[in-house]
Image (tube, coloured by chain):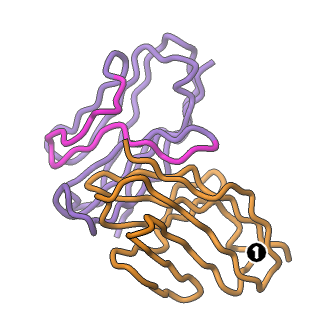
């Protein structure tokens, strides 16, 4: 079974530039998550999709971050304009069950390491 | 905002010893708990999940949950150098919240 795919793996941009990340979840997984992991910290949830609807985006900085999941499969996360503090690893995860299932296990992709100069 | 706290590291243990990792969480709503292992430069991978009070064993790993004390732990028995990684505790109340992680180094 193929895992969660993400691209690119690495990205270096200058502040105020824009960047986009792509995620393809495990086949059949209805729920997709984007996390931000700053060095030395645990992952922080940015946005959660159930199929193509947003379940939780309470921690997404909406003035600069946007995400979409068209057709309920692939997803893109965009940052525009980027700030220095956005330097982090952006992790995509997916899970099989319905949103809110306490036993729903999340599987993570390899992540995209973003450096903002 | 739920908070998940893990014992500060790094934790250094000799090969063959038991590594003990602790985690506390701030709310009483969380229903399930997960331990993820994250090697340097890699993404988190699930090693244990626990939903009920008590112990759950899987190979060399044992997770312990005490909901009354809002406490969850992970024991790694017969630690191996390959266990050297950062271990993330996560609590789920319909949203997964992670601790900052505890870095474990197993000395050969």
Q: Is A70 rendered above or below residue A110?
A: above
Left or right, residue A42 beside residue A103: right
Query: Which residue is located at x 43 percent, y 66 percent?
Result: B34
Q: Which residue is mark 1?
A: B81
Q: Quadrant of residue B17?
A: bottom right
Q: Quadrant of residue B107?
A: bottom right
Q: Nearer the viewer, residue B101 or A94?
A: B101
Residue B60 in the image: state x and y as whole percent: 59, 86
Name the chain letter of the residue that bears numbered label 1: B
Query: Which residue is located at x 44 percent, y 23 percent?
Result: A19
Q: Is A10 rendered above or below residue B49?
A: above
Q: Is A43 rendered above or below residue B49?
A: above
SS for callout 1: helix
Range of the magenta residues?
Answer: A40-61
Residue B38 in the image: state x and y as whole percent: 58, 59
Residue A55 in the image: state x and y as whole percent: 19, 42
Chain identifier of the orange chain: B
Q: Which residue is outermost to the top?
A: A16
The quadrant of the rendering that contains the C terminus of chain B is bottom right
Q: Which residue is outermost to the front?
A: B68
Q: Quadrant of residue A3?
A: bottom left
Q: Is A92 rendered above or below residue B104?
A: above
Residue A57 in the magenta stretch? The answer is yes
Chain identifier of the purple chain: A
The quadrant of the rendering that contains the N terminus of chain B is top left
Tag 1: Cα neighbours inside 10 Å, few (<14), some, or many (≥20)? some
Q: Nearer the viewer, residue A20 or B51?
A: B51
Query: Which residue is located at x 23 percent, y 33 percent?
Result: A68
Left or right, residue B8 beside residue A25: right
Left or right, residue A53 beside residue A78: left
Query: Which residue is located at x 69 percent, y 59 percent?
Result: B103
């Amino acid at each position: 079974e193929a895992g969660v795919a993400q691209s690119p793996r690495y990205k270096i941009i200058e502040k105020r530039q824009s960047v986009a990340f792509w995620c393809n979840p495990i086949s059949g997984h209805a729920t997709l998550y984007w996390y931000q992991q700053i060095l030395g910290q645990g992952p922080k949830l940015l946005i959660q999709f159930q199929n193509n609807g947003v379940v939780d985006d309470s921690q997404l900085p909406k003035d600069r971050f946007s995400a979409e999941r068209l057709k309920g499969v692939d997803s893109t996360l965009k940052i525009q304009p980027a700030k220095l503090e956005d330097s982090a690893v952006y992790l995509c995860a997916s899970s099989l069950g319905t949103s809110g299932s306490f036993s729903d296990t999340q599987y993570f992709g390899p992540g995209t390491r973003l450096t903002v100069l | 905002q739920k908070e998940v706290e893990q014992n500060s590291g790094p934790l250094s243990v000799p090969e063959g010893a038991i590594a003990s990792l602790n985690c506390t969480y701030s709310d009483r709503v969380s229903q399930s708990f997960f331990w993820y292992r994250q090697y340097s430069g890699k993404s988190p991978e699930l090693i244990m999940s626990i939903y009920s009070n008590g112990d759950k064993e899987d190979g060399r790993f044992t997770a312990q949950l005490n909901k009354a004390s809002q406490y969850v732990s992970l024991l790694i028995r017969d630690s191996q150098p390959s266990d050297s990684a950062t271990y993330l505790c996560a609590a789920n109340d319909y949203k997964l919240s992670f601790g900052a992680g505890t870095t474990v180094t197993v000395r050969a």
